[in-house]
Image (cartoon, rainbow, N blue to C red):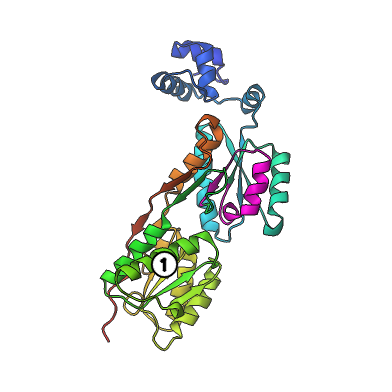
Amino acid sequence: MPKTNPTINEIAKLAGVSKKSVSRVLNDERGVSEKTRAHIQQIMRDVGYEPDRRARALASARSLLLGLAYNNRNPSYVLELLNGSQIAANALGYEIVMHCVTDETDAAEHLIRFMRRSGCDGLILTPPLSESATLIAALAEQNWPTVRIAGDNADFPVPQIRYNDRTAALSLTHKLISLGHSKIGFIGGPKQAGPTRRRLSGVQDALTLAGIPLDNGLLQFGDFTFESGQQAATALLSMAERPTAIICANDEMAAGVFQIAAARNIKIPEDLSVTGFDNSPIATHLWPPLTSVRQPVRDMTTLAVSLLVNPEIHIADAVQQFEAEVLIRESIAAPRQA
């Protein structure tokens, strides 16, 4: 194996193909069969070839950078999105540049300035930014390729990729009902947040199907943080007839419920069943392990990156929806008999 980085000519000779074919593979262009593409990529791996990103950028008039904008108070969720995006981008010769929007009221100006300074070839918006109609409209005017993760408004010509959290919430609630629960509390994020509305809708649908009336007194709303979970749990567990189960719109708030329950000597799951959402690392660090919902983050971020890198498959005005997986763990059980 050569000590220096092989040239495109050397790769072409080793693969038995033309220099143009190697170039097409490097730039992720059409005109090469999948079999030949795989063969060339294998040769590159075998000889330890590392593409010169600067040369590729100059040749393609691309920066080979993709922006990922976030303003989310759940660090584990942001990290999972970053990891998924970075893996997908690296596989196509791109890098992810993260940008935190600290002021939602000025988000459009912040992101436009970021995109101009960074020269990113496209932008991935994550919630809650992906739900802002004002922001999406402002970015659309700039004609930058943009994809929304978990976006909620389908009226804009910006692709959105999300998972079916309403159905997942319905399944979670159905499971609790099948165990014998009828007094089920819900802790959401901000009332107008897309994830809160979709997940609450799933809970309501399951209760309606089971003939159980919705008790608005069992609904609490926070901001997806551990502390807001504590506050909501304090309110629910202080009720004269407290719920026997609580569905939380994310795992961070569910952890807050665990803490308040422990402080009040309320045993999980014997006295209280608790579920979360997102299947973040904390879900398996809690005791008992938390029943949660695994988002198909890898699938969503891979598609998001592909749509930005390959304009020919750009799907404007489209919603791509993936199914989530409900993970039943030891945090739920049949309610204790009175």
Q: Report if residue 139 lies within the magenta region.
A: yes
Which stretch did the figure color magenta?
125-150
Q: Report if residue 253 lies within the magenta region.
A: no
Looking at the rendered structure, the secondary structure element under dot 1 is loop
Q: What residue is at 64 percent from the left and 29 percent from the top?
A: 62
In the rendered image, residue 285, in percent from the top left (x then y), is placed at 42, 63
In the rendered image, residue 212, in percent from the top left (x then y), is placed at 33, 75
- Closer-to-camera residue (214/123): 214
Give the total of numbered labels. 1
Is 123 located above or below residue 335 in the figure? Answer: above
In the rendered image, residue 11, in percent from the top left (x then y), is placed at 50, 15
Quadrant (top left, top right, bottom left, bottom right) of the C terminus: bottom left
Question: Is the residue marked by circle 1 packed among few (<14), some (14-19), or many (20+) residues within 10 Å?
Answer: some
Three-letter code, disc 1: Leu
Kindly indicate the quadrant of the structure image that contains residue 298. top left
Is 31 located above or below residue 205 in the figure? Answer: above
Q: What residue is at 34 percent from the left and 67 percent from the top?
A: 206
Give the labeled residue for mark 1.
Answer: 286
Is 182 located above or below residue 139 in the figure? Answer: below
Q: Can residue 174 be seen in this snapshot?
A: yes
Kindly indicate the quadrant of the structure image that contains residue 33. top left
- Closer-to-camera residue (22/153): 153
The extreme bottom residue here reads 240
